[in-house]
Every structure is written in structure tokens, then in C-alpha cells.
Amino acid sequence: MDTIGTKKTFTLPRRSLLKGMAMSGAALAAPGIIGRAVAQSGDVIKLGAPFHRTGIGAAYGRWYERTALAAVKLINEQGGINGLPVELIIEDDGTDPKRGVEAVEKFSAEHKVDAIFGHLFSHVSAASAPRAGELKMPYFLCSEAHSLAAGAFNRYVFQPSISDVKSQVSSMAPWITDNLGKKVTMIYPDYAFGYDHRDNLTAAIKAQGGEIVGDIAIPPTETSYTRYLPRIPLNTEVIYHVLVGPGVLTFVKELGEHLGSQRPEIFGFIDSLEAVSFDIPQLAYLEGTHFWEAMPRYAQPNQTSFDKFYREKVGVDANGASVDDAKSVATFSHMFSVWETLFAMKKAMEMADYKGPKQKIAMLEAMESITGFEESNEFPQGRKIFNGKMHQSFAQQNISKVVDGKLKVVHTVSPEDTLYPDEADYTKMSF
Amino acid sequence: MSIHNKKLFLLCLATLAGLFVLQFLLSDYLVLAFTRILILAVFAMGYNVLMGYTGLVSLGHAMFFGAGVYGAGLSSYYLGVSLPVAFLAGILAAIALSFLIGLLALRTQTVSFMIVTLMFSQAAFLLILYFSEFTGGDQGLTLPTSARSFSLFGLEVDMTSDVARYNLALTVFGVVLLGLFAFTQGPVGRLLVAVRENEDRTRMLGFDTYAIKLLAFTVSGGISGVAGALYGLMFGYIGSAFAEFKISIEALLFTLVGGPGTLLGPLVGTGLMTLLIDRLSGVTTAYLIVIGALLIVVTLWFPTGILGTLRDRWLPWLK
């Protein structure tokens, strides 16, 4: 540090600066160079998990990570896969498509993993799936987007656990029109996730002889909803809502103030309130309304031993919150897909006697040959039909009612009733 | 033709040669990482024309990057044009957009200019969401497999090949670097710097500073579009995330760290920041805090960035 007059300036000798820069450069590059030397040891199965540790999907990412760690621990306790231990490598994708692709490249070229799994948000998976295919990297989604089943991706991409949004929405519609009403007003976010719901619900409700009487798209930047609520037609029998993000609590409060006690029936997707506790005053208005759930957050009276086992292993209590912290509510209707996907991958690897990349194609073909999964500790959400052509699972769905601030399952749709005609055949694509 | 600033010219050639050799030395992953770095460095170099050389801080360059992404991606997706044609379409879209926005935004100065560019950029982002049936909105569009290879002058290029991708990115980077060398180190470049240092005086000397700034704005936006078009086609995906505000900020940060007003600064800044984020994110989820601390250090002790500091202290030709 030199002093010139009263002003202090910091001078850095050129030698030190260059030395520092060279060392920093070496430090930055080292893992990549070393990575080449130690990769492909062949005595371990490496799985890459690009989770949403930060960004808009962080609440999901946190629970995805916790679930994955629990599942991998269990798999290793049971002897690994084909006698090989499983190593989990996690990278943050920032819930960002650009970072998602970077993570896929890093897993493939640096960590040299055997497969990648765990992307949830559809824009991240839409960007990452093509790159995974190009890198010939098995890529398992834990998302809900319809893109895979619609044929937008490639032969390396699978979704063996959670149903896609088309299947979820269309299987709910018959129950909604039979039990709640036929005149439906939709309130949804004004972007792709909302349009998936709008398009699929509109078609499904019409197929049931119902009618969409109101269609209210709300921009994701909105923080108050009062100016949209008067657009709910008076003849509405059911309000269908799928808003997500922090604004949902305000939405529920303002909806209550607008409609009062003379409200129509209300049906929502639990995506709105994943990781949010139900027994808070802001959500009191939802008492008596219905929700879709992939997997019931609250342990039901007829809870299966599989559900109990899964909760124990992941550390989730009967209310769907962390056993360590009752205020930390899980993303229960999504995170099971991480658990089940790992066991689906294990099954395919066992079928192909997978020991390393040499059996990669055999493993993918084994995955395509699977027709379903029975309800078990490995698949605690329930029985599934797996469509090997579309690479997509079809699982049972639940409709729950809010009773005393908890979700109580009132109807379950069987996997068969969630099916729709094939839209793609990946088996005709080359590897 | 005389070459101004021969030392810098030689350094540019050495850098290009070094980058070419790098692909044989680095691990597979770092080759992939450098492919991305080269494309994003082109974006930062475009940004640097406006911010570094002309002294205009824009907060809306994501719209030009996005124009490149969508101009190229949509023409490939809907019209099925070949990749070189789609690439040109992306560049033209960015040039046209930057010229139009420049006409309007350059009527403002300093903070107002930042706000106006930010607002135009946000409007462009929201338009992408509004026309999501066409653009794919936030979910984006995955380009078809037919758009993963092309043939140019009898040369077959497979966009899925790591070697082809790196060398394609390097070629585009090289063309932009040498093009910008000619642009910034010659008489036009001195005019840009004159506007940056004292716009009133430049006007008094008889130059049309509005026209100079419009030229800088259009070149800057056009080069940002080159990067966007290449990124969209290279990765086979287009989405509104590429027109988000944070993309504008990335270009600003890469340029600030590397050295605004230095030709190679954006490459240094992009490389350093990208690799830092890449490495740190594997260690901690709080990597952005570390990045933030680094930025504070750079701003306090190296306000002219890494290469800017080298230029100010030892290497005056490094500009």
C-alpha cells in the first residue's frame, strides 16, 4: 500500500499479479485436467443430480436433494446396483436453462456419470434434454411437463415416475364435472405452465359435457389479484386455480374477500401450495375446497406400509413436514419422483446387468421394455403403468379435500384412467 | 492498409492461436466450457463496444442477445431454413432491433438511458411471453434434430460434435475479435472514445455524435445478436430465459471484470466469471456471495477491470 498525499492507493507488483493470475487459472482449470485422469474408475455407479438448489425452484430442489440422498443411502445399504456402490454427485442448476445445460455437460464430460436425473422445472429440462441426447447421456426427468410424451425429446430421456400434466389434468376432469359442477372458471399463471393446464383442462372438461365459462390468465409479476376477480362469471360452479409462487397466499386471501361465504366450489393443484403449511390463517378460506395431489401430503387413515417406510427414510412426518422442523413442509407431491426414479433406474440397470457405459444401450432398452411398477417401498406413491414408447409413466392420482386444515383424500384415480393415446414412439429413434 | 496498434493485433492473433491449441490440452469438460465461454465472450465484446468504448451503460442488451436467439431459432423451427441462413436471420434481427431501439434510446443520457434500455428490454421479454404460442414462452422450444447439422461450401458440420462446436465458436469469436479490432483501433474507434471522454467537445469539433452513438449501438446490438444466434443454434433450444434481465447484467459484469474499453477484456471477464461460478457452485450454494465479494474487490481496487488495470499501469496499448 503506497501513500500519495492524503490519498491511499493500492499497488500490486506485476510479478505478484501475474503469479496470482497464473495460480488462479491453474486452480480453476485443475479439476478439469485432473478429472480426465481419475474418471471412469468402473467400480462405482455415478449418478448426476442437477437440482434446483437456488433460483425459483429452490424449495423443490432442497427436498429433491434430501429425497435423493435418502434413496441412494438405502440402495447402498442394500448392496448397491449389481454389486457396485452408487455415488451421487449434485450440481446446482440455479433453476436456469443455461445452467441446466452446463450441468449436463459437466456431468457428462467431467464427472463422467452413468446417468443424470432430477430436473423438475420444464424450461430447464426443455433446454437440457436435447443436449443430454447429443452427449448420449441417459437423462431421467422428475418433471411434469408434457414435452417428453409429446415426442419433443430423444431416446435418452425418460420419466419413469411422475405423470405428465396432460395425464394429471385430464384424469381429474371427470371427477370435477361429476362432483363439483360443469361450469368451470380457470385462473392460471400467464405463462407456459398455466397454458398446459388451460389447454388440457379445457379439452377434458368439454369431453365431459362441461363448459369453461371463465378464463383468467394472471401475469406472473402480479402481486394483487383484486382487479382480476370480478371477471369470475356469476354462473361459475367451480373455480380451478393453479397459481404458483409467493403471491398465492395473497390470492387466497383476496379470493375470500371477493367471494365471501357464497362461493362456488374450488379446485386447485397442490403445486400452488407445495412447501407451504396449510394450517396458517391466510389459507383458512380454503377449508372445504379440493386439491389434486400426486401423493397425499398428510398420512391417511389407510396409509400403506410403503408410504410409512418412505416417510421414515426421507425424514418426513405424518403432516408432510420435516421430522426435524414441523415448519419445514415438504414438496410431497413431487419429490417422490426422485425416490422412484432412482429405483426405476436401478431396476433397468439390474435387468441389463449394468456395470458401466458398455451396457448403456442395454440399460436404455431394458428401461423401454418395462411395462410398469408395483406399489412397494421402492414405489411408495403407488402402482404405475410405464409406456416404453413414450418413455412416460402413468400413475394413480388423488383428489383431496381440506378438512380441519389438513388434506384428506376423497377420491383416487387408477393409473388406467390417466392414460391417453400414444403421441410418440422413441423406440423408432436411433441411439 | 496500415494496422493501428500492432502490439494488440499480435496479441489478438496469439490469443486466437492459444485458444486453438487449448482444445488439445484441456479436459473434455473444459473444452465444452470454453465453447460456451467463447460464445458469451462474443456477447460481452458486443456489449463492450457500447459500454467500454462509447461510455454508454445499457441495461437492456438481453433483448439483442434474445433477438439473435429468436431470429435464428424461430426461422429454423418454423421455416426449416438451413443453420447458416438461420444464423444470418438472427444477426439481421438483432441489427434491425438495435438500430430501432438505438434511434429512440439515444435521445436520453446516463441514468435515463439505462432505464430506457432496461424498459425496452423488459418489454421485449414480456412480448416473448405474450406470444408464447409462437415463441414457446418461458418453456421455450426445442429445435428439431434436422437443425443439428449443416453443410457450408461442401463442408459438413455436425453440431453435436464437441470438436466442431468448439471450432465453430472459435471461428465466430475470431471473426468478431478481428472485426472489432479494425472497428475500435482505427479512426471510428477513436471517435467512439471521443464521445465517451467528452461528447460536447466531439460535437464542437464537427462530428455528429448521435450518428456515432447510433453506429456503436447498432454494432453492439448486432454482435450481441451474433452471440445469441450462435448460442440458440448451438444448444438447440430457445426460450425466454435468454432475454431475461440477468442476461443483460451478465454482459455488464463480464465486461466490468475483464476491463471495459479493452478488446480482450470481455474474454478474460467471461472466462474468469464462468469458471468461478462453475467451480464454486460445486462447493457451496452461496457461490453468488463469493462472486459478489469479488466484484466489490474489483470495483474498489481495479475499477477499470483486469486488463484495464494492466493497461493503466504497464501496457498502454492494451485497449
Image (spheres, rainbow, N blue to C red):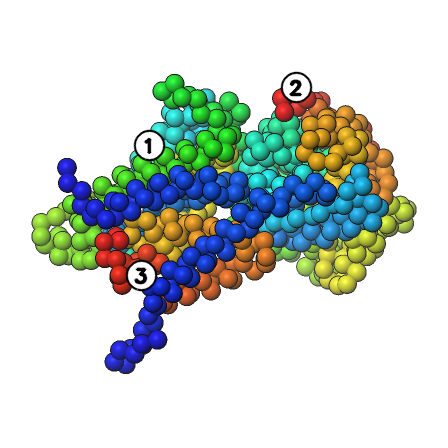
Question: In the rendered image, which residue does mark 3 sit on?
Answer: B309
Question: In the rendered image, which residue does mark 1 sit on?
Answer: B92
Measure the C-alpha gap from mark 3 to mark 2: 58 Å
- Closer to the camera in the image, B104 or B255: B255
Q: Are marks 3 and 1 on the same chain?
A: yes
- Label 3 crowd (10 A; few <14 / some 14-19 / many >=20): some
- Label 2 crowd (10 A; few <14 / some 14-19 / many >=20): few
Quadrant of the image occupied by residue A250: bottom right
Q: Which chain carries label 1?
A: B
* Residue type beneath disc 2: Lys
Dot 1 falls on a residue whose secondary structure is helix
Q: Mark 3 lies on which chain?
A: B
Question: In the rendered image, which residue does mark 2 sit on?
Answer: A428
Give coordinates of residue A91: x percent, y percent: 61, 49
Q: Which residue lies furthest to the left in this view?
A: B205
| Residue under the point 47% across and 64% down | B293
Give coordinates of residue B272: x percent, y percent: 44, 53
Dot 2 falls on a residue whose secondary structure is helix
Q: Residue furthest bottom?
A: A6
| Residue under the point 56% across and 54% down | B281
Measure the C-alpha gap from mark 3 to mark 1: 35 Å
Pair 3/1: label in front = 3
Pair 2/1: label in front = 2
Tell whether B188 sits left or right of A184.
left
Q: Which numbered dot is residue A327?
A: none
